[in-house]
Image: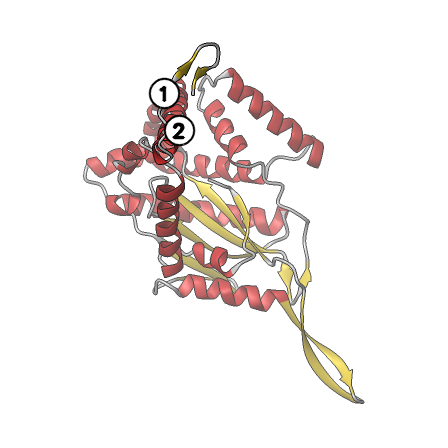
Amino acid sequence: MSTYRRLNTKRKRRHVDARSGDHDKDKREAEARKGIFVVRPSEDARRNKPTWLSLGVKSSERIHRDGKVTECEGPEDFADYIDAEESTRNYAIVPRMKRGKLTTVRLSAGKTPLEGVIVTFAPWVQSCIEDKVAAGEDPDAVVRSIWASFVPYAKAMFVGDQERFFLGEAIHADTQSLHGDLVVSRFENGKRVGKHGLKAGGPCLVGCDRQLRAGATISASKQKLYDHCVRKHFERHGRDSRPFDVQLARLLDFVSETILGPELARYRSAYAASVPALEKRAIEMVLADMDAEKAAFLFEFGVQETSTPGFGPY
């Protein structure tokens, strides 16, 4: 899952609202595309895992405006708000002389005024909350408590370090991987302010950093990819720079540990011990998907798989 995206289309902007009709439409179309273009027998195992919505966690959104935080009630409220902010921040009303008279015109900056950052709950945190569900506890209260403690610190990082306007945030529970969206902007009245770029490292850096911090032993190929990503980040942004999405993930992990307490340590250790097996399973799933796609292709065109000496199976 991407950790950063520019909200440069109406569809992307409305997708941040997990309860909106556009978000639901995006998910249905994505599933349909998988069925048309990709044959994935391994998807069956993934589908057996329940979504957080079915476990009792509610998707929710909050608007941050004029120093106040407002909980959204309607399923389209947050999407409508983000759309309105895009229009407001991308355009400026400026005075102009026209035929000897002073008037105003609406000018567009022609840029992408809104940015979205995705922060996923750590795997061991999700496992801990799943066990709380099994024990009869309310998972929504736990998730909201963690997220509500995390957001003020994240907001301070955006406003202070990155000089962004913090517009709102949302919890997405309609998925198997619990995560939240943060929406920010560096535009005001059609003009850019603040620093250029959030210097995000991407999902590979975030995931590997979490696994290494948990004490996991990762494969040599993954370590090589991780080292490459770190080196490229330093080349682009300097050795003192730290990927912003990695900082947010570490912050969410710290807040989660503070709220869930010492019991989280055993879940983190269990996750670290499972990483080699997870990597092996991931490779097996990719190979199974490739074999299934090949078989579907041969079946569609009526080609029988044969063996040719020296060239392997066709």
- Residue 286 to residue 36: above or below: above
- Residue at 56 percent of width and 64 percent of height: 86
Q: Is residue 213 visible?
A: yes
Mark 1 residue crowding within 10 angstroms, few (<14) / some (14–19) / many (20+) = few
Residue at image position (37%, 38%) is 259
Q: Residue furthest bottom?
A: 100
Residue 199 vertical placement versus 99 (above, below)? above
> Disc 1 and disc 2: Cα gap in Å?
30 Å
- From the image, state whether disc 1 or disc 2 is nearer to you: 2
**Residue at 50%, 41% in the rendered image:** 2
Q: Of helix, strand and loop, which one carries label 2?
A: helix
Residue 64 placed where, x, y %? 48, 60
Counting residues from the start of the chain, the first of labels 1 and 2 encountered is: 1
Q: Is residue 168 left or right of residue 241?
A: left
Question: Residue 294's mark?
Answer: 2
> Would you name the residue on which mark 1 appears?
274
Other residues around mark 2 within 10 Å, as few (<14) / some (14–19) / many (≥20): some
Total marks shown come to 2
In x, y percent, where is residue 150?
Answer: 45, 45
Quadrant position of residue 25:
bottom left
In the image, residue 283 sits, relative to residue 243, either above or below, namely: above
At label 2, which amino acid type do we have?
Lys
**32 and 244: which one is in front?**
32
Residue 146 image offset from top left, x and y in percent: 38, 43
Q: Quadrant of the C terminus?
A: top left
